Image: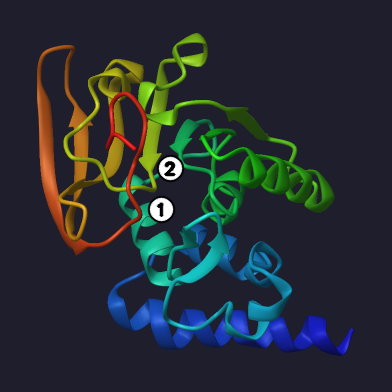
Amino acid sequence: MENSFKFERLRLNMIENQLKPRGITDKKVMKAIADVPRHLFVEEAFAEQAYADHPLPIGEGQTISQPYIVAEMTQAIRLNKQDRVLEIGTGSGYQAAILSQIAFKVYTIETIYPLYIKARKLFDKLGYYNIITKYSDGASGWKEEAPFDAIIVTAGAPEIPQPLIKNLAIGGKMIIPVGSLDSQELIKIYKKSETELETVNLGECRFVKLTGEQGWQC
């Protein structure tokens, strides 16, 4: 019980000291971050660092993004309770967990099997039953469940994968890091029609690489 209170305090301090000063104002996003136990999405050895202002390793050469990046991407996509969201790159499962508190349903794809299994077990343990998982090449999208109201890509791509554009509903939004292996720009895409996209650059970022047919070749 004492640890539970400790981690709750750390979450609230994170919101006050890391997120609000950087412009995270969406009440739905802040409530989701306050409710989701981030320390359970990292290795036990890193639990004390889970709410610090930096990413952490989660194994398999992957990381859990720093809290601010998760909050920024979630706020920028502006979800509604009826939205169906596709996430590319389940990783630790933390971003999907945050999305699940706001959207109707979250579909998330992971290409690394041990991470896929670990995240699925954690979702079930925490009762996040509106998260649907898939072990596959995420950059190719999820054609069978498309179109999606929103897509969040949590790995850096050399360019915007066209299958994901096709998976996006008219009026839908996508957030994706695009650039080199060392540095990317966080791009927000609004699909105005089948042939017209509007893009906004949200600034510099750095993510692990997006692999697969539409990403970086391993």
Q: Identify the residue shown where x is 65% and y is 85%.
A: 48
Amino acid of disc 2: Leu
The crowd level at tag 2 (other Cα within 10 Å; few <14, some 14-19, many 20+) is: many
**Residue name at image x 55 percent, y 40 percent:** 112
**Numbered disc total:** 2
Q: Quadrant of residue 182?
A: bottom left
Q: Secondary structure at mark 2?
A: loop
Helix, strand or loop at disc 1?
helix
Residue of label 2: 79
Q: Nearer the viewer, residue 133 or 112?
A: 112
Q: Quadrant of residue 108?
A: top right
In this view, 39 is above or below 169: below
Q: Is residue 49 above or below residue 77?
A: below
Q: Is residue 130 left or right of residue 1?
A: left
128 or 122, which is in the foreground? 122
- What is the crowding at mark 1: few (fewer than 14 residues within 10 Å), some, or many (at least 20)? many
Residue 64 at x, y percent in the picture: 50, 62
> At 57% across and 62% down in the image, what residue appears?
58
Quickly name the residue at label 1: 74
Q: Position of residue 36 (x, y in %)?
A: 65, 63
CB within 8 Å, label 1 to label 2: yes
| Image: 35 above or below 171 | below
> What amino acid type is highlighted by mark number 1?
Thr
Q: Position of residue 191 (x, y in %)?
A: 21, 25
The quarter of the rendered structure image containing the C terminus is: top left
Q: Name which of mark 1 and mark 2 comes first in the sequence.
A: 1
Q: For marks 1 and 2, give the one nearer the viewer.
A: 1
- Residue displayed at 80% across by 47% down: 127
Q: How is the image coloured?
A: rainbow
